[in-house]
Amino acid sequence: MSPSVPVRAALVAGTATALVLAGCTSREETPAAQSNGAGPAASAASNAPSADGCTLAKTGYPKVDPKTAVIGFSQSEKEANPFRIAETQSIRDEAKKLGIPADHLLTTNAQSDLNKQISDIKSLLDRGAQLLVVAPLNSDGLQPALDAAKAKKVPVITIDRKVTSKPCTDYLTFIGSNFVEQGQRAAAALVKATGGNGKVAILLGSSGNNVTTDRTQGFKDELAKTPGLTVVAEQTGEFDRSKGQSVMEQLIQSHPDLTAVYAENDEMGIGAVNALKTAGKNPGKDVKVVSIDGTRNAVQLIADGSYNAVIESNPRFGQLAFQTLQQFGDGQAIPPSIVITDDAYDESNAAQKVGNAY
C-alpha cells in the first residue's frame, strides 16, 4: 500500500466496521456504509501490514499498549454541539470498553482557542500521556505541540480535521472523512432536491481548516456540472447555529429570491431553517436545505419536511482510534490516512434512520 493511498473504513452507529479496502473510491465498494446501524465491531483484518506505512521501527518510538497506557485526548471545540459531544463520548466509551482505568484517560478542551490547544497538548504530555488522540482546531498552527510530542516519542493520531504537518514524522496518521467527497455528495443531493435549477447560498464553516476548504471545493466542483444552479452568496457561519441563523437572516434580506441553501454543517443548516421560518418562508419547500453532519435534529427535520438532505460526517472515532494505536503498538504499518465512509439521509430514509443519527 503506497503512503499516498488512504485506507477506507466504515463507522456505523458508533462502531468501526471492518477496515479496509485500500484505494477504494466509491461507496458501492463499501457496503457497510449502507448498514442500518447493527454493524459488527472492527475486524481484526483491518489495517493490513504494509512496508510503506508508518511503523514503530521507522519512528523509533517505544512499544506501548493502549490498554495499559496513559492516553491523552485533546478536543478542539466546546462540547456544545452534537458532533463534538458524540466525538468525545466515543473516545470515553471505547476506553471504558477496553477496560482502561478512568485516570488513564486524560481529556482537555481547547474551547476553540488554538493557543489553548497547544498548551493543552503540552499539558497532557507533562501529565504522562504516552499516546495522544487530537481533534485539531485548525489544519495549521499545531506544530509546536506536535514537536513536543515527537520529542517525548509519543504517537499522535489526528481525527476529524487534517493537519498540514507530515504523517509518520510529526504525527502518526489522520482518521476522518473525505471532505471533498462530502461536498460533492451534498451538491448532488441539492441538484436532486431542486431539480437542477435555482439560486444557492453557501454557509461556510470556519476558516483555517481543511474541512471548510474541502467541503467548499467538492460542492462547487460538483455543482458546476449543473448550470441551472448558481451560487449567489457565500458567507461564513463558523459551524455555529446562532451564527448560521444570523447570516441566513442577512442573506434573506440581500437575496430574497434564494431557492436553496448548502450549509457546511448541520448546526448552521438548522440555524438557516430557523431564519427562513421567521421570515415566513417554508424551508424544505420554498427553499431547499442540504447540509453535512448527520445530527439527530437535522435528520428529524428531514422527516418533518423542513429539510431536504444531510450527508453524514461520522464523529464516532473511538473504536478506530484505539484500534489503530493498538496496531501501531503491535508493530503493524499504519497508512498516512484512514478515510471512513459516511451515510446519507433524505426524504426516502430519514424517518427510518433517525435512530442512527447522533
Image: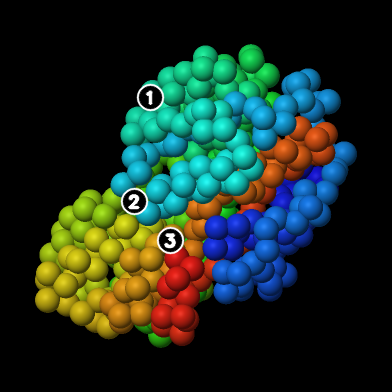
**Residue 92 seen in this snapshot:** yes
Q: Please report whichever mark, 2 or 1, sits nearer to the chain's N-terminal start.
A: 2
User: Residue 322's spot in the image, x, y percent?
Assistant: 64, 41
Q: Amino acid at mark 1?
A: Lys
Q: Which of the pair 128/150 is nearer the observer?
A: 128
Whole-angstrom CA distance, mark 1 to mark 3, is 27 Å
Q: Residues within 10 Å of mark 1 (few under 14, many from 20)?
A: some
Label 3 sits on a secondary structure element that is loop
Q: Which of the pair 316/106 is nearer the observer?
A: 106
Residue denoted by label 3: 358
| The quarter of the displayed image where residue 120 is located | top left
Q: Is residue 153 above or below residue 9?
A: above
Q: Quadrant of the C terminus?
A: bottom left
The residue sitting at 43% across, 20% down in the picture is: 119
Q: Please report whichever mark, 1 or 3, sits nearer to the chain's N-terminal start.
A: 1
The residue sitting at 13% across, 65% down in the picture is: 253
Q: Amino acid at mark 3?
A: Tyr
The residue sitting at 64% across, 48% down in the picture is: 320
Judge depth for marks 2 and 1 and give the one in front. Answer: 2
